Amino acid sequence: METIVFIALLTSTVATLLGVFSKSTKQTIALMALQAAAIGFVELMYVLVNLVLGLHMEALVKFIASFVEWFSAAAISPLIIYWGMVRTADTVDKPLIDVRRGSLIVAAIVLIHLGLWVYYYQVIPKQLEALPFISLMFTLSVYLMVTRRDPLKVLVGLNMAENALFPLLARSPMVVVPFLLVLMIFVNIVGVFIVMESHRDYGSMEISDWRLSR
């Protein structure tokens, strides 16, 4: 694995890990943007190099698609959720699981993935060498989603999980990319709209305080 790829994956993994323990919504959104920016940087540089060296239409289309996907994950989606936070509240809370037990669970998740990476490193194909990082970030993002009451942090966890799959999605057919981008932006807009309406109706940013009927 190239050094720049390792640094980018490590940076995005650390951002995901910090997001699990972040307290304020603003911090969590910032870490989401950092994760997306780092994890998409390498693929963007690859297609940029191919564009400069190749200077053909296919390379240009690939660069535009990768840039739009990267910009959407690193800027547009965080801004949508940030707008929802501005219209509601910058909630400061703690995970449902206390810090001590949560730290043990997260440490176990990291050690398990590290062990699997060391064990399978020699047999993992080069095109899938980022898989241990992807799996770890995805698992941590799901953990973030299920241990928070703040719906915006849950939405951030969903985006982080989707961002973790970026190295795999970048190799998917080009026709799939626009569909995925539109779908994720739509999910964020609808999610933020629901959060704002629920906050207005119930005056709370905790999902447990929301009721089906008044």
Image (tube, rainbow, N blue to C red):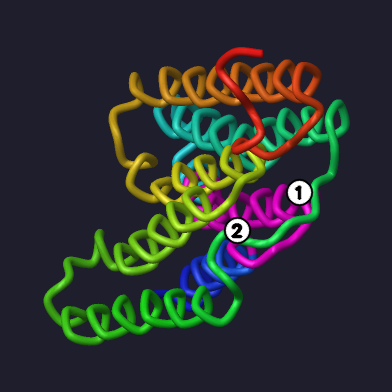
Provide residue 66's location: percent of width, then percent of height: 51, 36
In the figure, is residue 203 to the left or right of 78? right
Q: Which residues are magenta?
A: 19-48
- Left or right placement of residue 113 versus residue 9 in this view: left
Q: Is 89 placed above or below 140 here?
A: above
Mark 2: amino acid: Ala
Report the disc number at residue 38.
2
Can you give x and y, in whole percent of width and height, for residue 101 in the image?
Answer: 50, 78
Residue drawn at 58 percent across, 38 percent down:
155
SS for callout 2: helix
Q: Foreground: 98 or 76?
A: 98
> Percent x, y for residue 50?
46, 46
Q: Residue at x 61, y 61 (%)?
A: 95
When the figure is inspected, residue 57 is found, relative to residue 41, above or below; the finding is above
In this rendered view, identify the residue nearer to me: 160 or 211.
211
Residue at 84 percent of width and 44 percent of height: 90
Q: Are marks 2 and 1 in contact (CB under 8 Å)?
A: no
**Residue 149 left/right relative to 23:** left
Please give the label number shown on residue 25: 1
Identify which residue, 4 or 189, lies in the foreground: 189
Q: Horizontal and vertical percent for residue 27? A: 77, 56
Estimate how packed mark 1 is, as few (under 14), some (14 to 19) or many (20 or more) residues with alpha carbons within 10 Å.
many
Residue 8 seen: no
Q: Residue at x 64, y 51 (%)?
A: 32
